[in-house]
Amino acid sequence: MEIAYGVAKGLLYLHEECTTQIIHCDIKPQNILLDDNYNARISDFGLAKLLMTNQSKTHTAIRGTKGYVAPEWFRNMAITTKVDVYCFGVVLLEIICCRRSVDMDNDYEETAILMDWVYDCYREGLLEAILDHKVDALDYEMKLEETVMIALWCIQEDPSLRPTMRKVVQMLEGVVEVHVPPCPSPYNKSA
């Protein structure tokens, strides 16, 4: 989970601590590098958007990678730092579950879309089902349910419901309480 925490801290820096606010627009595993000490480093700023000092949102053409693109890109809505929060939530679920966000080779249709499947497991109290027991991806100190809840907050379809990266970092640190998230998509057939 140190990698996820490092990515969260990196996004917090880009969103709130840089002189110029930066929206990365393409957070995905391929754009997360590890240094010699296995610290996460965000890379590939080719799709990034820089915001002016007085600007908190922008309009632009769709950017990002299938499986990580926030819903507002498809609705011609203004783009904010919340698109990176969404991408981070998807990556966090991938880290927890040790699988891709979209797996069309999966034999079971109900598990093909990671976000929907994880929410269903969370709602039904079956979080053990999301773990790949062949891989020791999670240390024993990690609170599975709480981390899944953080990810579910990040992937809310409505960007106004997503936390800021500052709040995500605080939730990962255990400084801020993680409340029960609503269904990420109001159109989720199983919700």
Image (spheres, rainbow, N blue to C red):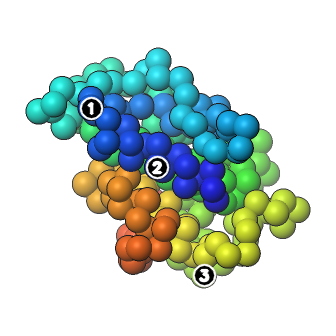
Q: Is residue 50 left or right of residue 113?
A: left
Marks 2 and 1, how far apart at CA: 16 Å
- Few, some or many C-alpha atoms within 10 Å of disc 3 (few <14, some 14-19, many ≥20)? few
Q: Position of residue 182 (x, y in %)?
A: 38, 70
Give the vertical position of 88 relative to 138 (above or below): above
Q: Position of residue 84 (x, y in %)?
A: 41, 41
Q: Quadrant of the N terminus?
A: bottom right
Whether residues under marks 1 and 3 lie with C-beta atoms below 8 angstroms apart, the answer is: no
Point out the tag, 2 or 1, that comes first from the N-terminus.
2
Point out the tag, 2 or 3, that comes first from the N-terminus.
2
Question: Closer to the camera, 49 or 68?
Answer: 49
Give the vertical position of 147 relative to 16 (above or below): below
**Number of numbered callouts drawn:** 3
Q: Nearer the viewer, mark 2 or mark 3?
A: 2
Q: Nearer the viewer, mark 1 or mark 3?
A: 1
Q: What residue is rendered at 73% in x and 68% in y?
A: 139
Marks 1 and 3, how far apart at CA: 43 Å
Point out the tag, 1 or 3, that comes first from the N-terminus.
1
Question: Closer to the camera, 131 or 39?
Answer: 39
Marks 2 and 3, how far apart at CA: 30 Å
Q: Is residue 65 left or right of residue 186?
A: right
User: Pointer 2: what residue?
Assistant: 9
Kind of element beneath mark 3: loop
Mark 3: which amino acid?
Gly
Mark 2: which amino acid?
Lys
User: Pointer 3: what residue?
Assistant: 125
> Does any portion of residue 88 appear in the rendered image?
no
